[in-house]
Image (tube, rainbow, N blue to C red):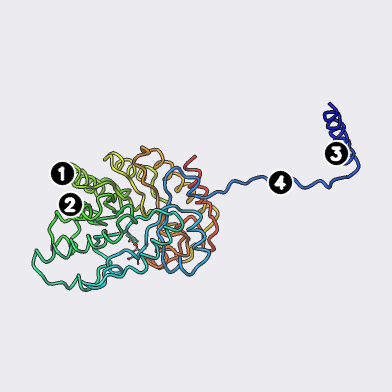
Amino acid sequence: MKKLQTFLVLILFAGGLACSKSKNEEKPVSPPDPPVTEEVSLQKKLPFPFGAAVNINLLKNNSAYREVVTTEFNSLTAETAMKTATLHPQQNTFNWTDADYLIEFARQNNKRIHGHTLIWHQSLPSWITNFQGDAAAWEDLFKTHIQTIVSHFKGKVVSWDVVNEAFDDDGTLRNSLWLQKLGPDYIARAFQYAHEADPDALLFYNDYGHEYGPTKRTAILNMVNDLKSRSIPVNGIGLQMHTRYTMADNNLANAINTAAQTGLKVHISELDIAMNPDNNQNLTFTASLADQQAQKYKFIVKTYNAIPKSQQFGITTWNVSDADSWIPGNYNRPDWPLPFDNAYKKKPAYQGILDGAK
Ligand code: 9MR
């Protein structure tokens, strides 16, 4: 009992102390915590993977570039580092340096890597364009090329553009070296060889111009449906979508929706929106143009977001900022096709992309 009394007295005394402390000592009022601002990034805000093609030199040497790539995107494609001329410069030589750098960057930063590209009519080293051999030798070259690369990246590259740009705009097969040496069914065999080397990799047919109109895209979709019906392992269609701000929404929607009708995954794989398609050397990028570009990005994202979830492989822009885009150099004109400006600042197009997913 005595113990309890002592205990109660102590409690009262302590309470009195606490009380007098709060009355007598004017505690400085600390400023309220700043509101927790939610970090906005494309990879966080979009309901499907959002990627960029990357230039390995910029990734290594330009800190602003690396920062935007790290923060904004969760899927990466090598703009050139996984092309044939880079990876396979001589018949018995493979050069993995830059591609492996990207793989390691992706591993450290938790990015998905999409492989681009195994079979294309461009970016061929001279040992291939000059190769002399019979049909069996060409087949061996073709198979070895595909399988060495896919095996090297097995478990690291989740998906491949197995064949790129095999069609002309009139819907006929492009008269490429591959068609000439291997015959029209080389496309199917490329998919089979890639699948043998990595049965888990998702395999895409990639091309541009689905939004031009029905001619080319129908030929592509027929080819892909034919592969499916023959149980050739094709998992997806890549729509490059190097487009322009004047492209009709209807054409863009038809490109996306007809690809989705195949039931395969759809990757908008090389998105950029040119603002100077008429090659005007004196054009400036006005607020009005920036807004029209934002609307076009928004429309593409919104339309893509409406296809079935399971088919949304993602959207990839073709590089990061206007300073890095292939378009000004390729067409020798000023242009501003990407969602980040020359200083890696977000353009209205960035908000357009976010708005498209709302
Ligand atoms: O943007 C790429 C450019 O830097 C390269 O010099 C060029 C040749 O390798 O390829 C460009 O990327 C193309 C892509 O691989 C396939 N679709 C069209 C792209 C733009 O030309």
Looking at this rendering, what residue extends furthest in the top direction?
A: 1
Q: Amino acid at mark 3?
A: Ala
The residue sitting at 20% across, 70% down in the picture is 128
Residue denoted by label 4: 33
Q: Are marks 4 and 3 in contact (CB under 8 Å)?
A: no
Secondary structure under the numbered disc 4 in the rendered image: loop
Which badge, 4 or 2, comes first in the chain's sequence? 4
Q: Amino acid at mark 4?
A: Asp
Which badge, 1 or 2, comes first in the chain's sequence? 2
Looking at the rendered image, the disc whose residue lies closer to the viewer, 4 or 3, is 3
Mark 4 CB in 8 Å range of ligand 1?
Answer: no
Instruction: Give x and y (percent) for residue 79.
Output: 37, 62
Which badge, 1 or 3, comes first in the chain's sequence? 3
Residue 188, numbered label: 2
Instruction: Give x and y (percent) for residue 289.
Output: 50, 54
Q: Quadrant of residue 281?
A: bottom left
Instruction: Give x and y (percent) for residue 92.
Output: 22, 72
Distance between the alpha carbons at the discs numbered 1 and 4: 62 Å
